[in-house]
Amino acid sequence: MDSIKVHNSLKPGGPVPFVPIEKGKVSWYACGPTVYDQSHLGHARNYVSTDIIRRILVHYFDFKVNFVMNFTDIDDKIIIKARRQRLLDLEKQKSYTDDEILELGKAAFRAYAETNLPKLLEDEGELDVNSYIPRRDAAYGNVLAGGTLTGEGRPGDAEAKLKMHISNMTSAVIAINGNQVFKGADEILLPYLDSLYKETIDTSDQSIFTDLTRFMEGEFTDDMDALNVLRPDVVTRVTEYVPQIANFVERIVEKGFAYEAEGSVYFDIAAFEKAGNTYARLRPDNRNDKALQEEGEGSLSKSLGGKRGAGDFALWKKSKPGEPYWPSKWGNGRPGWHIECSVMASDVLGSRMDLHSGGIDLAFPHHDNELAQSEAFFCEHGHEHTWVNYFLHMGHLSISGSKMSKSLKNFQTIKDALASTYTARSMRIVFLLGRWNDGVEISPDMRTQADSWESAVNNFFTNTKSLLVEIAGTAAAIDGNVKTLSISDDKPQDGLRAGLEQAKKDVEAALTNSFDTPQVMRAIAEIIRKANVHVSTYKSDMDLPAVEAIGRWITKLVGILGLDANASPPYEGLGWAPAAAAANVDPSTAVQPYKTVFGAVQSDVLGLDLTASETITDIVSQSPDAEFESLAIAGVRDPEQLALPYLRAVSKLRDELRRLAPTASPETKKAILALSDRVRDFDLTNLGVYLDDRPDQPSLIKFVPAAELIAAREEKAAKDAEKARAKEEAKRAREKADEEKWAKAKLAPEEMFKNDERYSEWDSEGKPTKMKDGSEVPKSQLKKLKKDWDRQKKAHGEYQAKFGGGTA
């Protein structure tokens, strides 16, 4: 195996060799979520990509990984969310008149505009719900139309945040105008009520905050389970580490790298660098970015004072009224954001770890500050300390150019995504198609590429298993322990076999090159393409053992990558693991639906009285029960394998019925074809089984998700119905045209101009000779009238020939 190389944010540039502290083991700390809201696709991008790397290290490279992840359950965002919701709940319990509620909404409306949309206040006159829309369109119409605040470049986070505020204001206007302030204006009421009453909340009872964080932690865990993300080996929470955090901060102060000011404690960047240490090693260009620094400190920390340096950051924050607090030597306070990870990671993993990971948005200031305070804690003066050997940063997931985030409210929750547009597998495929450390912007093209890849793998698994079952004639054909269908060492490694060996080398090279999953996905797609070409070209003379080996190799890879939620290491077998097998369902229970179908088909075939067919008689007389029992006794629990004895019997019966149909009596033939179609399109489709009919060959049994088959059946039925409707409409249109044609043709040519008021005299054939005023019909008009008369004479002749001699 080649040595692994990884992209290390501590060493910008290409991948660097990965050398763990202890051979064969990896210590890893991952920044977990701040649990104050539902998780979204941006979180999925981070944690699924992290899970993919973790699985590769464990299941491909055989490392023993100690994976630690935290839950941030003390944070400014949590405090604000919980406190504001409590204040809103209390406000709704007050005895307000309708007018008072309306005034409350209007006051909150004006306050929200002043804080977040100041351009609305630039025009003369007071902003109110009536003037809001025209002022909004005048001030921010360009951004709403997809432009930028500056008029240049592509929209980004600033524009997304502005749209969020506008959306909140617009919803509030609708609510106020509809006298529904407490039902539709929450987003403007929450900050307004917080500004009025935040200091009145009794935070000695911390359940106001922990009720929120515990619930959201559970929601996050459920989301990760749904995405097939492995749970951490160790989980830490800030609320369980506050005393240790205070002690950690004390030690940094004692070493001269932090100072107390007005009840808070700040990290002293100047002292840290003076001692020979490096600050902002991950993002040195951002060290003076005031916006990022303020975001890192939190919105509740803006009024804290006493910093010696503009970039100094809080290790311990003095708690203000309305905030949770814990005792410390500096008075009541709470941990800063960055310090929590330093303390928890060091407590579990020690003074040095192999890997630290998180989203790229955490690089500065969070991770840079983590590094600084941890290195300050462990360093000996004059000697820098290495706390993290490799920093892995997962790329952003963006939407319309902006990162997906809770604060911008431009996100789709994981729950909503899984309930509507994604499966856990399809979402993971999207992330696998991009490098873990690159940004991802989900587009229709990317979704199409992911869907195509998944379909190719699904079809390959289905077809390979079908071919194995067909050639072996036994359900044991797809048992992973069968030696007869394995590639033998004495066969030449050329053609498809050589392609498989090259694919293995390509995957090895990709995974050692900083877990290059896009290249892995391409290698899988390419070997499937080659296998499909081989099967199509050689048909009965194909190298089926090589095809099987490819299927088993791909099965192992998709298992390692976390694409099969029902599979377990070492991912041996062929194809996606059935859910029932994962749940270890009783064999008799698993096979009952297939047994029922066989019984029904057997009964229907007997009702056709086809005793002249020895094949029919043999199949009907032989029960598949014995073969099923032998499989169950042998320990087989895969429902597909258990079902095969019954499915093969049904397929053979149907194949024989189709062979007999051409020579059967018309009535029997009709019954045979109806039964044949029902078995394929309903009985088996509803069980997730597709019979692939082939000319002059037995049908192939393919396992396909029932939902897909049913959807395809319904789509075909809808198309057939539409085709029949169009055909009927065309028929009616033709009939109507014919009716109109013959109604017109019924009139004799001698009579066609007699009722035309433009004329006053006609000749013996009924052609006009004089106009109404007695003048002669113009020659030019006579020419046209003769053409019309001739056409009518011909049509009338056809009418008489078809219907007889009547005229109108």
Image (cartoon, rainbow, N blue to C red):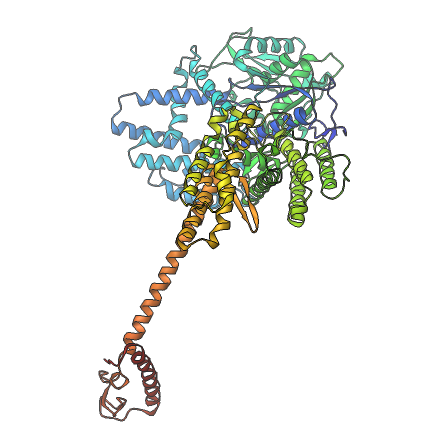
Of residues 435 and 748, the one nearer the viewer is: 748
Quick check: 295 left or right of 683? right
Q: Is residue 503 visible?
A: yes
For the point 45% across and 30% down, the residue is 592
**Total marks in image:** 0
- The quarter of the picture where residue 7 lies is top right
Task: Check the image and report above or below for 740 versus 585.
Answer: below
Is residue 659 positioned above or below 401 on the image?
A: below
Q: Position of residue 797 (x, y in %)?
A: 32, 82
State whether residue 752 is above or below residue 307.
below
x, y percentage for residue 273?
70, 19
Residue 280 in view: no
Q: Nearer the viewer, residue 665 or 546?
A: 665
Query: Residue, x 41% and y 49% (percent of image)?
Result: 671
Residue 463 percent location from the top left of the image: 59, 41
Spot occupied by residue 647 in the image (x, y as percentages of width and height): 51, 37
Which residue is located at x 76 percent, y 34 percent?
489
Residue 572 is drawn in which quadrant?
top right
Which of the pair 592/96 is nearer the observer?
Answer: 592
Q: Quadrant of the N terminus?
A: top right
> In screen coordinates, is 613 left or right of 540?
left
Quick check: 117 left or right of 445?
left
**Could you say which quadrant of the image residue 307 lies in?**
top right
Which residue sits furthest top?
Answer: 329
Q: Is residue 189 above or below residue 796?
A: above
On the rendered image, what quadrant is the C terminus found in?
Answer: bottom left
